[in-house]
Amino acid sequence: MFASDDVWLGAMVPKRWARRAVTRNAIKRQIYAVSAAPGVALPRAAHVVRLRAGFDRKEFVSASSDKLKAAVRAELQQLLARAARTPAAPAPAPSAAPSSSP
């Protein structure tokens, strides 16, 4: 599917879980910053990080608060450590369809 042997990373932060755009963008920035940090060795594959639970606005008042950044960073470090331990599945070999000659 992918021509290169690099690590690809995508981030999905749905409006359902982070209502304000500034919060969604801050979370995405954290995803890319944590994944680019030294010591993070993800397997060569395409990875997608998707927010699956909300961040309560009452607890995290500001999108730029240190409390939100620390919570996101801690969760991401656990997730990326787990992804680094899991071996990447080998890419399936393209199947060659038998050619029919007239």
Image (cartoon, rainbow, N blue to C red):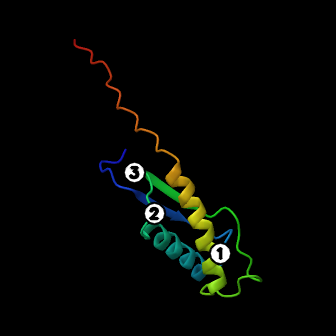
- The residue pinned by badge 3 equals 44
Residue 62 vertical position relative to residue 27 in the rendered view, above or below: below
Residue 12 percent coordinates (x, y)? 55, 64
Q: Are marks 1 and 3 in contact (CB under 8 Å)?
A: no
Q: Residue under circle 2?
A: 40
Image point (44%, 65%), residue name: 39
Q: Amino acid at mark 3?
A: Arg
Task: Tell me which residue sits at (63%, 87%) in the image.
Answer: 65
Residue 92 horizontal side relative to residue 54, left or right: left
Question: Mark 3 touching mark 2, by CB under 8 A?
Answer: no
Looking at the image, residue 100 lies above or below residue 12: above
Q: Which residue is mark 1?
A: 71
Q: Quadrant of the N terminus?
A: top left
User: Mark 1 Cα within 10 Å, few/some/many (few <14, many 20+)?
Assistant: few
- Alpha carbons under labels 1 and 2: distance apart: 18 Å
Q: Are marks 1 and 2 in contact (CB under 8 Å)?
A: no
Separation of marks 1 and 3 at Cα, in angstroms = 27 Å
Q: Earlier in the sequence, mark 1 or mark 3?
A: 3
Q: Measuring from the top left, give residue 64's x and y in whole percent.
A: 59, 87
Along the line of sight, which residue is nearer the eye, 35 or 98? 35
Relative to 21, residue 85 above or below: above
Image quarter of residue 97: top left
Q: In this view of the protein, can residue 14 be seen by the observer?
A: no
